[in-house]
Image (cartoon, coloured by chain):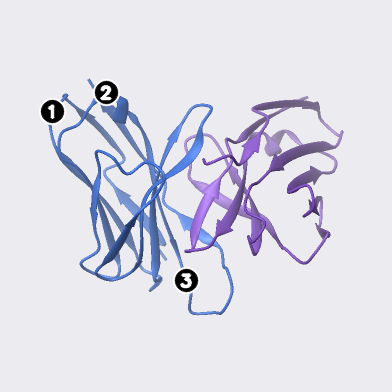
Chain colours: A blue, B purple
Amino acid sequence: NAGVTQTPKFRVLKTGQSMTLLCAQDMNHEYMYWYRQDPGMGLRLIHYSVGEGTTAKGEVPDGYNVSRLKKQNFLLGLESAAPSQTSVYFCASRSMAVPGDTEAFFGQGTRLTVV
Amino acid sequence: GEDVEQSLFLSVREGDSSVINCTYTDSSSTYLYWYKQEPGAGLQLLTYIFSNMDMKQDQRLTVLLNKKDKHLSLRIADTQTGDSAIYFCAESRTGNQFYFGTGTSLTVIP
């Protein structure tokens, strides 16, 4: 039972390069989220999706794009990486099949360094 | 993010109780959560409380909710070295967005 899987786990980018982070979940969850974690700032929501083909902006969306072409995958793209995007990125998913709020399941994180 | 606040650090001696505090912003939040993050890992749900409750107890964990003051706390009884981690409170706001606090790093001294 894989749960939420993020790839890659580590990456070093040069300023201006692009990359895509992949999040895959095998729990048939409707909702998926991308967060970044920075020291002293907790987790901040970048973008989220409430279903296949839909995305929405969170607290800190600038410099990132997302796509949810398939229900199980949520992609986070950096078109032109900047040092300020050095962070640990977490993906999470949640089911809304049961009425009411439910637990969010997290991936293990992607540590990205932009030099 | 967005004004869910926690103190950054807490140190306690093994066997003592730990109390981690959180203030949140959205009075319409239905559920409030406590997550634990161990070094190099993702977040795992510890416990949660429904907004119409004042208290929830789950083994060594006690959650207290003061809706009037928008204050949430997590008490860990008989704290062990394995409890050393970062603890995040989170609220689920309208639009199904989760907002997390800044995290409290708990250090348990043997």
Q: Name the side, left or right, on which B70 lies relative to A111.
A: right
Position above or below: A55 against A11: below
Q: Position of residue A36 (x, y in %)?
A: 40, 39
Residue type at mark 3?
Answer: Ser
Q: Position of residue A23 (x, y in %)?
A: 30, 55
Quote the CA–CA distance across marks 2 and 1: 9 Å
**Mark 1 or 3: the one toward you:** 1
Mark 2 and mark 1 in contact? Answer it, CB < 8 Å: no
Q: Looking at the figure, which quarter contains the C terminus of chain B? A: top right
Q: Which element carries disc 2, helix, strand or loop? A: helix
Residue type at mark 1?
Answer: Gly
Position above or below: B85 against A2: above
Mark 3 and mark 2 in contact? Answer it, CB < 8 Å: no
Question: In the image as oriented, which residue stretches furthest toward the top?
Answer: A115
Position above or below: B60 against A1: above
Mark with earlier residue (3, 2):
2
Which residue is under mark 2?
A: A83
At horizontal 53% and vertical 27% (from top left) the residue drawn is A40
Residue A95 marker: 3
Is disc 1 in the same subunit as disc 3? yes
